[in-house]
Amino acid sequence: MPITFDEGPEAGRRIGFGQNRLEAASEERDETTLATALRDGRARFHLFADGKVLVRKDEDPTASFSAQDYRAFGGSAEDLVLLGHDGSIPVLATTIAMEGDAPPEPYRLYDMRSLLYSESVSDSEASAAARASSLLHWHAMNRHCGRCGTRSESRLGGYRRDCGKCGSTIFPRTDPVVIMLATDGERCLLGRGPHFPPGWYSTLAGFVEPGETIEAAVRRETREESGIEIAAVRYYASQPWPFPHSLMIGAYGEAVSSEIRFDARELEDCRWFTRSEIVSMIEDNHPEGLRCPPGKAIAHALISNWVAG
Amino acid sequence: MPITFDEGPEAGRRIGFGQNRLEAASEERDETTLATALRDGRARFHLFADGKVLVRKDEDPTASFSAQDYRAFGGSAEDLVLLGHDGSIPVLATTIAMEGDAPPEPYRLYDMRSLLYSESVSDSEASAAARASSLLHWHAMNRHCGRCGTRSESRLGGYRRDCGKCGSTIFPRTDPVVIMLATDGERCLLGRGPHFPPGWYSTLAGFVEPGETIEAAVRRETREESGIEIAAVRYYASQPWPFPHSLMIGAYGEAVSSEIRFDARELEDCRWFTRSEIVSMIEDNHPEGLRCPPGKAIAHALISNWVAG
């Protein structure tokens, strides 16, 4: 029985989507794994329609359903993936075809951001749904072999796809992204994307490029987006981010320049904020109505941890 | 002109493949970018045959060639990627068809591991070649759209592929991998893979799975491979690892169990090593002839940094 460290010291354990209890045991899987899981009467299912996750919104909201629910909602057998086991209970995910625009009461469909920020379900269910969302999107984008174009097949309960023609195997994809708070000690740097909610400012972020270290990506992205130069980079924590299948790598950057020249194609604004301004943004009483991303986002953790010193 | 931090404080700057000087400027690219780079008479080329990089092995060894060399070796126009600019000089990469088994003297083909460990070319050339190797492999495995199977096209100098049929866009892939040194303070945990060179022991490592934090991946991989339980996880440094396109995320793990039960499918052996044993392994005078990976690998950096305290 594995020892668990839910109260471990590092920051990552308290960030949304980061509380996965499921043991994927991807190395232990074979061609019988999925069928065995499906035969288990205790199996639980996460169900997705158009990339949104089904939630039963009653006195005890849940995104985890029984095999009976899976069948009642017409869950796709082809899209089934085994996310892993919670203890000995198999947890699976698949797509459902939703007739009309919305599911019947008391069911709702949540996009993954709303699921995170609304805190409608438990952290462990949201984390399992994040794994499911990433895997289902990856399968949808990889029905065919990238090398030869032939239709490929899902194997090992969805943890691999094989091409029967050229023999290629392809594994689920996770994109590393750096997300960083640049600070000069007294101030921190936040930007505003054109599609952010009103008044919202957040940390800068961007994909790690081929052949790049995390540290180089933090410096390059900060420079490209804001014009600010970073010297020392300090890792903080990480967060699975199912949009569609990223790994957010959170870091602090020591700013060694101060004049902002932001990239107007990516940002609507970019400014320095003092600690007291950030406190008012977190407490939602900033005089201009400015705000930060809410608690479950690693951006919030980076910002609030900095304010706390 | 960007400020550079080649002597920056974090460990990652001294690790092989991590010294990329090239500005990819992927956000600035358009359909003219590659043609403009090719018209520049100063352009440099990295050339690959069967996944190996061409090196001119003379008094001043190099993996960087002129446009004349690119044409003389029959470089593929279709496979061309623009790695970025070194200052204002464009640096590209492509494949060559090598007749016979080996190139003529004084040229050699190096697999990327040999290029790293032999230190045959400068750190910045090896780092550029690592980016090239990752990108060229990714293109080879993604000639077709994963969603619909149609032949896709390389765009933006190789930093994107577009499907003309279904409209999918796909970006270069980088796989996050955790590589960790578990320690109990006085000892560290190393394993031996079945394909390692004789006497060689190294850190454990494995892919970050969908919906998993870096910290959870460190704990899970260590447990699965060795049976050792990890509590606190501390990030150390990162390294681009072109096998075929990974990002190694190096960390220390606080071991809170001591009985090893290693996974015999993945490892031939796994043991605890004392500091003095590690010193003899690094200095290559261990009584049993045991050794660690050489200097440019992040495994070496993790191990030697721990020994140094």
Image (tube, coloured by chain):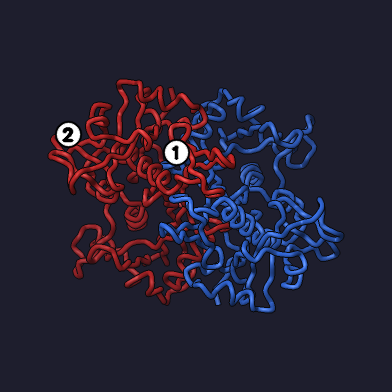
Chain colours: A red, B blue
- Coordinates of residue A20 in the picture (x, y in percent): 37, 37
Q: Is residue B43 above or below residue B122?
A: below
Q: Is residue A154 left or right of residue B249?
A: left
Amino acid type, callout 2? Asp
Q: Amino acid at mark 1?
A: Ala
Q: Residues within 10 Å of mark 2 (few under 14, many from 20)?
A: few
Which chain hosts label 2? A
Question: Relative to B299, does residue A225 appear above or below in the rendering?
Answer: below
CB of mark 1 within 8 Å of CB of mark 2?
A: no
In front of the other: label 1 or label 2? Answer: 2
* Residue A247 seen anywhere in this rendered image of the structure: no
Q: Is residue B226 above or below residue B218?
A: above
Residue positioned 42% across, 52% down in the render: A248
User: Closer to the camera, A285 or A196?
Assistant: A196
Q: Which residue is mark 2?
A: A60
Chain for disc number 1:
B
Q: How many badges with numbers are in the image?
A: 2
* Nearer-the-camera pick, B249 or A209: A209
Judge whether residue B212 can be spotted in this image.
Answer: yes
List the residue tagged with mark 1: B216
Q: Taking A270 as reference, is A159 above or below it?
A: above
Which quadrant holds the N terminus of chain B? bottom right
- Secondary structure state at the residue bearing disc 1: helix
**Are there few (<14), some (14-19), or many (20+) residues within 10 Å of tag 1?**
many
B141 with respect to A218 (left or right): right
Of residues B247 and A27, the one nearer the viewer is A27
SS for tag 2? loop
Estimate the x, y position of residue A191 in percent, counting from the top left.
34, 67
The residue located at (61%, 58%) in the rendering is: B131
Q: Residue at x 42, y 71 (%)?
A: A226
Q: How much space separates mark 1 and mark 2, taking CA atoms?
A: 28 Å
User: Residue B232: horizontal and vertical position, in percent?
Assistant: 46, 38
